Amino acid sequence: MSGIEPFYVMEVLKQAHRLAEKGRNVIHLSIGEPDFQAPPSVVQALTDAAHAGHMGYTNAKGLLGLREKICAFYAKNFHVTVSPEQILITTGASAALTLACLALVEAGSDVLMPDPSYPCNRHFVAAADGVARLMDCGPETGFQPTALQVEQHWNQNTRGLMIASPANPTGTRIAADELNAMAEVCRKKQGFLIVDEIYQGLVYDRPAETALALPAVASGFEDLIVVNSFSKYFGMTGWRLGWMVLPERLAHDFEKLAQNLSICAPTLAQHAAMACFHENTLALCEERKTLFQNRRDFILGALADIGVPVPAKPDGAFYVYADISAFSESSVQWCSDLLNATGVCIVPGTDFSVLNGHRYIRISYARDMPDLEKGMSLVRSFIQQR
């Protein structure tokens, strides 16, 4: 436990809540949670499932009907064939990543991951008695690793690689050819590749992609695990529902582990999630994605006007990773001062980067435009007055 650090995003939120309790108006540009609620069709499906009495345990792998819809989603959107037996429904993407680490990481072995990255990933590995080995990834590669970097960091103790595309906190994606090259490195080293695709639906400027469609997979790379979630694109964060796509040879082992650790994912949420793949639901989510893109463009323009650099343009998720090193030597102190002075809640990069987090902040634009406009105005005033 002494090696598990707090999730500082949540600590910042505690500070913001204390201010709100004192009557301060707080503008949250912090947490990675869509301001949109779950689509109405999903809420109705939940209500229908509850009235129908669908409240018992499901199979540990999840409802077959939901797994079949996920398979159809991959077939229609990415021309990838996946069997329902390869799908495991989980209690959010966090449970999927935990399962993957517990199943694949040997005690004392290493898992490569980029710095910056989602901080809990390090602790999923630690929970399996593994060691997260961080690769310093700068803005020149969109804060994402390269295949060459992966090969250079791989040693005899390395078990695999964990990445995300699009990524939190940067909102950047890995180009398909680079991701394929990483898969080839993992194949050569006989290691696994875990790809977190929970922001897959929230991508801008070019079509969505999946690692399941990589040439390396088509040519026989069998150690790929893809993780996804209903939280972000579908706005279902508190419903705690995700899924993972597993190699056929590992599906039974993961099912066995899931049986013992969680029994099954929330049953009512599973029934409701089947409505996510209705045409009207997807159309609504695409409309919301357009709004997110507009918000991204506003934030990028506002930061440029204020003079806050964004070293790598985000093309997915709903985050901007900005460099405030010209204004402070400590992103933690800068965010705390900003919150106390203006009521704008932004999180420091120290959560996401062990190496350079003091330079960066993460701004979430999962808020409506009035909040974004007011927040950026207050950030401008804060910087000008210092």
Image (tube, rainbow, N blue to C red):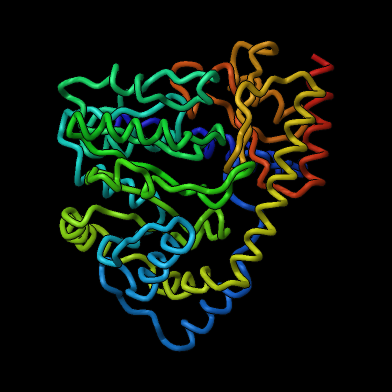
Q: Tell how many labels.
A: 0
Q: Horizontal placement of 46 versus 329: left or right?
A: left
Quarter of the image with the N terminus is: top left
Q: Nearer the viewer, residue 97 or 202?
A: 202
- Image coordinates for residue 346, horizontal then vertical, percent: 65, 33
Q: Nearer the viewer, residue 221 or 358?
A: 221
Q: Nearer the viewer, residue 3 or 191?
A: 191
The residue that appears at 47% across and 26% down in the rendered structure is 116
- Image coordinates for residue 299, horizontal then vertical, percent: 74, 35
The residue that appears at 16% across and 60% down in the rendered structure is 252
When the figure is inspected, residue 354 is found, relative to residue 16, above or below; the finding is above
- Image coordinates for residue 110, horizontal then vertical, percent: 23, 27
The residue that appears at 64% across and 58% down in the rendered structure is 286
The residue that appears at 66% across and 46% down in the rendered structure is 366
Q: Nearer the viewer, residue 11 or 221?
A: 221
Q: Horizontal placement of 61 versus 39: left or right?
A: left
**Quadrant location of residue 255?**
bottom left
Q: Horizontal placement of 209 versus 156: left or right?
A: right
- Image coordinates for residue 108, horizontal then vertical, percent: 17, 28
Q: Residue furthest bottom?
A: 52
When the figure is inspected, residue 256 is found, relative to residue 214, above or below; the finding is below
Quarter of the image with the C terminus is: top right
